[in-house]
Image (tube, grey):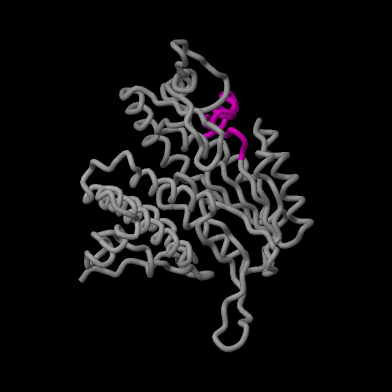
């Protein structure tokens, strides 16, 4: 089936296997992951145990602080559906010699997808949506990681098929993009032209930033209380797509079609979404965006309450804010932001139990 990509009109194929097949794929992943995890390099962060998107984001802050402020931003076009089966199996066979496991992997790749009652089998791609697909993608793209020279072409940060290269000069960034295009071509892949560009991080008002892993990144100057600060840093906050996704989801929860549902259910769904969305984006410079999203959720809830009582939004706002000591239980994202700093762990280590 085809599902829409968030924030765009494009659609991506999603292969939903039968329960038995998903169990088999999960078992294969459990067997293969420790073997290949020993070989994976620090440049890879996506779908790996003990690593997260915020670990990759922390590398961007550290490298920008070191002076690498020319950024190559790209991702791989149709990565999951473009990986050649024969080359993928060659990458697997570098570490796996068990014929039973290899035969099972080939069967998984040849399983195909049913569309309109017909089974379509391809010679490229891993089924996106399968438990083993992210691991297989990392195994194949490990060939990119191990030939990448950070000293010559900059620091590579890869989250599955999303790529960012932090470079020190424009010449290095251009060389990195050429090297990236060449290596991917040898793998039967190519960068997505619409998302490939070189960005120079400066503090100018008209300077560009870049989006990566849901955040918008930009080089800014710290605010001084008395005189302008001399400290500059790489700030990040939710991208426009991420903010629009939040507004769309809040709008769906408080839609007019759901007026017959109890108000407690609506507040509970809003809180669940805000906790999840805010839990990811709180590690950044997201205070202004959090204030805006919290205010939007409050206004949508007020409008929902007003419509239920066939009154205006202003009446609903008075009932929510003045008629309830806690805004009917609606949580707020204000005051939850944790600003990351260079060369410091993005998440404080857990305190030892006494």
What secondary structure prevails in the magenta region? helix
Check the image and name the residue furthest to the front: 311
Tell me where residue 274 sits by quadrant.
bottom left
Figure label count: 0
Any magenta on residue 311? no
Residue 18, image x, y percentages: 34, 22
Residue drawn at (67%, 56%) of the image: 71
Q: Is residue 85 magenta?
A: yes
Is 9 located above or below residue 301 in the figure? above
Residue 263 is situated, as x and y percent measured from the top left of the image, at 23, 50
**Residue farthest toward the top in the current orientation of the protein:** 118
Going 44% across and 52% down the picture, which residue do you hit? 51
Residue at x-position 46% and y-position 28%: 14
**In the displayed structure, does residue 137 sit left or right of residue 67?**
left
Question: Which quadrant is home to the C terminus?
Answer: bottom left
Classify residue 47 by image quadrant. Answer: top left
- Is 107 on the left-hand or right-hand side of 351? right
Q: Residue at x 45, y 19 (%)?
A: 107
Above or below — where is 329 with respect to 21?
below
Quadrant of image for the N terminus: top left
Give x and y (percent) for residue 162.
Answer: 57, 45
Q: Is residue 25 above or below residue 193?
A: above
Occupied quadrant, residue 30: top left
- Image x and y of residue 122, in percent: 55, 18
The foreground one among 206 and 129 is 206
In this view of the protein, which residue sits in the foreground, 32 or 135?
A: 135
Residue range (magenta): 76-95
Residue nearer the viewer, 167 or 312: 312
Which residue is more in the foreground, 308 or 90? 308
């Amino acid at each position: 089936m085809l599902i829409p990509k968030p924030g765009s009109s494009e659609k991506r194929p999603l292969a939903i296997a039968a329960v038995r097949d998903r169990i088999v794929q999960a078992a294969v992943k459990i067997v293969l992951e420790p073997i290949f995890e020993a070989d994976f390099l620090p440049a890879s962060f996506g779908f790996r145990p003990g690593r997260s998107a915020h670990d990759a984001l922390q590398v961007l802050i550290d490298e920008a602080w070191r002076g690498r402020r020319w950024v190559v931003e790209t991702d791989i076009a149709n990565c999951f559906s473009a990986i050649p089966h024969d080359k993928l199996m060659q990458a697997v066979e570098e570490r796996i010699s068990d014929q039973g496991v290899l035969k099972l992997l080939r069967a998984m790749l040849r399983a195909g997808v049913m569309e309109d009652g017909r089974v379509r089998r391809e010679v490229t791609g891993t089924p996106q949506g399968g438990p083993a697909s992210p691991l297989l993608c990392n195994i194949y793209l490990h060939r990119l990681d191990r030939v990448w020279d950070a000293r010559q072409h900059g620091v590579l940060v890869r989250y599955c098929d999303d790529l960012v290269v932090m470079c020190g000069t424009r010449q290095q960034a251009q060389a990195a993009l050429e090297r990236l295009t060449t290596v991917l071509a040898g793998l039967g892949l190519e960068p997505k032209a619409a998302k490939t560009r070189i960005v120079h991080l400066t503090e100018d008002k008209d300077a560009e930033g870049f989006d990566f892993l849901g955040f918008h990144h930009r080089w800014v100057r710290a605010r001084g209380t008395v005189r302008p600060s001399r400290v500059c840093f790489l700030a990040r906050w939710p991208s426009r797509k991420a903010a629009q996704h939040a507004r769309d989801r809040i709008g769906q929860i408080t839609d007019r079609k759901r007026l017959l549902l109890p108000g407690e259910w609506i507040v509970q769904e809003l809180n669940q979404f805000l906790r999840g969305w805010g839990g990811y984006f709180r590690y950044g410079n997201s205070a202004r965006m959090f204030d805006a999203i919290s205010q939007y959720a409050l206004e949508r809830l007020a409008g929902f309450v007003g419509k239920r009582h066939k009154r205006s939004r202003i009446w609903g706002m008075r009932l929510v804010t003045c008629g309830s000591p806690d805004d009917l239980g609606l949580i707020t994202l204000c005051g939850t932001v944790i600003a990351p700093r260079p060369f410091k762990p993005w998440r404080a280590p857990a305190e030892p139990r006494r």
